[in-house]
Amino acid sequence: MIQMKNVYKKYPNGIVALNGLNVEIDQGEFVYVVGPSGAGKSTFIKMMYREERPTSGHMFVDGIDIATLKNKRVPMLRRQMGVVFQDFKLLPRLNVYENVAFALEVIEESPSRIRERVLDVLDMVGLKHKARMFPTELSGGEAQRISIARSIVNKPKVVIADEPTGNLDPETSWDIMNLFEQINATGTTILMATHNKEIVNTMRHRVIAIEGGLIVRDVDGGDYGYES
Amino acid sequence: MKARTLLRHFRESLKSLGRNGWMTFASVSAVTVTLLLVGVFVLIMMNLNKVAEDLENDVEMKVFVALETDDVSKKSIEKSINDLPEVESAVYSTKEQELADLVLDFGNELSLFEQSNPLFDVFYVKASNPQETGKVATEIAKIENIEKVEYGKGKIEKLFNFLNAGRNVGLILILALLFTAMFLISNTIRITIVARRREIEIMKLVGATNWFVRVPFILEGMWLGLLGSIIPIGLVAALYYNTLQFVQPKLSGELFQLLGFTPFIYQVGGLILLMGVFIGVWGSFMSIRKFLRV
């Protein structure tokens, strides 16, 4: 699903974020990406959806070569994946239904198919009854569930999550994690950057620790490994 | 792009106008004011041009044929004049006709001269480019049996210099105004886009193509330009109508006239509309470029 070989990333300001990183992630895996701030975690995540481009090295996501992918083809890559953020990134002017439908509208799905899929995923995240509410009327956990619904509405092979529980209280975080487990159970690859020690140590999955732009630890069912 | 998507873009662009009510108002006002200025300038320019042309077309040379020239020579003079490439027309008038015209203008006392007509046979010559009248006159004067060539020497050169300067200044002013308008509108639309940065970012993240993001903004720019051109078109038309009502009677019988209300006002209206749409679309296009790099 995801292959990185000697991926090196140097920003224009001279900072080296990834220093020859190698990794392979298979379809259907659930992977935590951990590590201290500034270790290269964000760059690693951003490369998955080609917000950043490797300076050198090879990188494939679902067979697409990220290093040489033309700007014009980036939308095609992003349609294969879902992305979830710490700050939800919902559109405040659209209601819950419209926010989720948005992801299908931009890829020009047919209206009947949009309706069907949106109601499906809203049901799955348990917020079908709030379809007409606006993001400002939702709690943090609800907002994150909507953003997860949006990320999976196009049935992606992989969901990239950048600290999805970062803004949520512990109890809500568990709800969100259960949702990710559920999505993963359908065969979707999950790649999640997180600082939540408790979650990583309880819901055991593969843990990749990044420090200084390199993977320093890669253990199946490993623990968080840092003091939080 | 599917028809349904295009429809969606239209709907989005219209919705966005309403949502960003105050920004829309600001942009439309900016477009309105600048287009109004441009419109008034175009009115002035086009009329100045018309006056210039009328005056130019009125410039002609009077070529006096030497006395005692026989008919054969007159024919050859006419041919020589017409053979000059810069000559548009040459009309012959005998001295009898000339006298008849004078009698018509100045009264019967002059009919005394019918006994011994002191006038010359003349050719009235127009140059195809009135600005070259002086040059043509010199050439005609070289032809045999020409007594002299008269035209408003000195005066018309001054007139032409004045008209040319007027045209150039007007053109520069219009261009400068348009440039300012474009800058203003581009900036206003940029603010609209900055306010919707997040929306663009999310669109890009869920896999929207650049054109998908761009089109609603470009349409929005188009609406802004269209809306901004309505008031200027109306005001310019009203202004011109009233100016004509006031000025035209005073110009009757003069050598030059203003342009008629129609179709001129349709042309100016169309021009204002086109400029509005163009600066709106161009402004959006330029502003959105840098926000697409997500």
Image (cartoon, coloured by chain):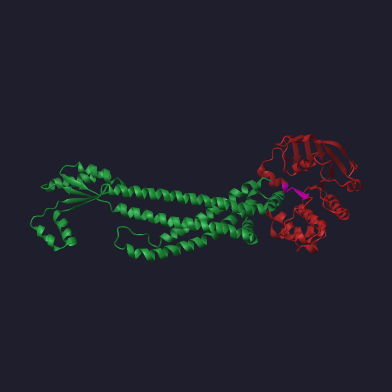
Chain colours: A red, B green
Residue pictured at 37% horizontal, 48% vertical: B164
Residue nearest the observer in this picture, B74 or B163: B163
Where is the C terminus of chain A found, in terms of image quarters?
top right
Q: At x 89% / y 46%, what residue is drawn?
A: A197
- Residue B271 in sight from this viewpoint: no
Residue B222 place in picture, x, y as percent? 56, 56
Vertical position of residue A153 compared to residue A223: above or below: below
**Left-right relation of B269 to A38:** left
First to last magenta residue range: A78-84
Residue under the image location 85 percent in, 45 percent down: A195
Point out residue A166 in the picture as x, y percentages from the top left corner.
83, 50
Q: Is residue B52 visible?
A: yes
Residue A25 location (% of width, % of height): 82, 41
Name the quadrant of the N terminus of chain A: top right
Q: Quadrant of residue B17?
A: bottom right
Q: Nearer the viewer, residue B279 or A186?
A: B279
Foreground of the two, B231 or A151: B231
